[in-house]
Image (cartoon, rainbow, N blue to C red):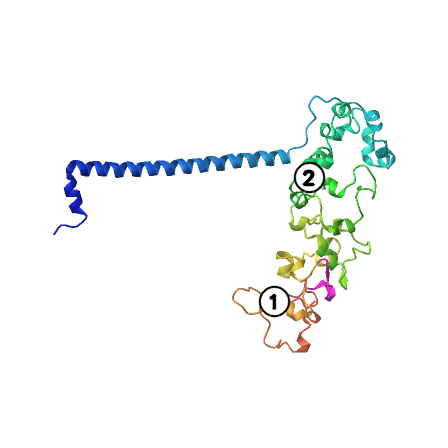
Amino acid sequence: MESNTCFPLRRLGAVGVAKLRFRQSHRRWLLLAVVAVCIASSLGASTDQQKRQSQTAAQASAPAGRPPGAEYVGTDTCKTCHEDLFTKGFQATPHSNLLKLAGKHGCEDCHGPGSAHVEGGGDITKVISFKHLAASQSSQRCLECHEYGEEHGNFSRSMHLRNDVGCTSCHSVHEAKFKPSLLRASQPNLCYRCHQEVRADFSKPFRHRINEGLLECTDCHNVHGGFLTRQLRATAAQDTVCFRCHTDKAGPFVFEHVPVKTEGCTSCHTPHGSVNPRLLKRAQVNVLCLECHTLTVDSAAPGIPSFHNQAQKYQACTMCHVSIHGSNFSEVFFK
């Protein structure tokens, strides 16, 4: 008996079958063409969107340009409307030197030629106004003079600028509120405006004396960017910044405690503040030591010997291992 699928085809005949197969093939090719057009349109739209995003990013990162057709009018013209800026303390800032140097244009060195701004009756759109610029644009304007040297050279790649914190977020350009860096507030209060979690650490019983004024945030961190994590500074030997004060822990030692060189001081200490003495991460010394010195598969550190039974007399590891940061005489840091 013939199948039901073959029987209708036999009734169509050879010509009918050919036409039917042609129509089916035509429909498949038409469907493939529609899918190809949709994919091409999607890719084209994606490419256009990427171009627009790239153009937007380029415009955001590009420095503000000179207003078209504007000419320099001189600082005396600026004073006719902005006399208050000159009387509030601008003369006491390093920027006031731009008014005295030959070949400089004073205010217009930063804000651009001001003729269009003056002719427009003070139209803010016809002059470079830092208040209306993105952080990347205003900072780029500042970096035209302040880009050189170790302190500011990496600001374009700093975490502050990446988080939309520019030069004028921290510095007061026209007023010398806090010399010599023209800061808007004194340290550490200026840093606390964003870093509230760190403020709590400096209120703990054991802490670095930031609030007392013995240290500043910038003693350890380069706020303008750097190559180390958390924008930390380094010693002249490119060691961790802690060794600038704690020189006795720097070494080099004959027998080194591995975490000091591989993980750094923060493997055991919290740098800002702690509820534990010596800014330790754990209240009991032996608990801190056992985080590494336990016989586990994934730990290369030697386990504690069998006679260290963790009774109370063995819990203060550093009573015997006194040179825990490194030693020149004992491989187990006894002295």
Residue at the image point whose x is 82% and y is 27% from the top: 78
- Does residue 279 appear anywhere in the picture? yes
Q: Nearer the viewer, residue 204 or 5?
A: 5
> Based on the displayed image, in which of its 4 quarters is residue 114 positioned?
top right
Residue lying furthest left: 1
Amino acid type of the residue tagged 1 in the rendering? Glu
Amino acid type of the residue tagged 2 in the rendering? Ala
Magenta residues?
271-280
Q: Which residue is mark 1?
A: 291
**Disc 1 and disc 2: Cα gap in Å?**
44 Å
Mark 1 vs 2, N-terminal side: 2
In the rendered structure, the answer to whether residue 3 lies left or right of residue 242 reads left
Q: Residues within 10 Å of mark 1 (few under 14, many from 20)?
A: few
| 258 relative to 151, above or below | below
Residue at the image point whose x is 68% and y is 35% from the top: 137
Q: Residues within 10 Å of mark 2 (few under 14, many from 20)?
A: many
Residue 148, numbered circle: none
Residue 135, numbered circle: 2
In the rendered structure, the answer to whether residue 199 lies left or right of residue 311 reads right
- The answer to whether marks 1 and 2 mark residues whose Cβ atoms lie closer than 8 Å is no
Number of dots carrying numbers: 2
Find residue 123 and report its horizontal and vertical position in percent: 75, 28
In the rendered structure, the answer to whether residue 176 lies left or right of residue 261 reads right
Q: Nearer the viewer, residue 266 or 194?
A: 194
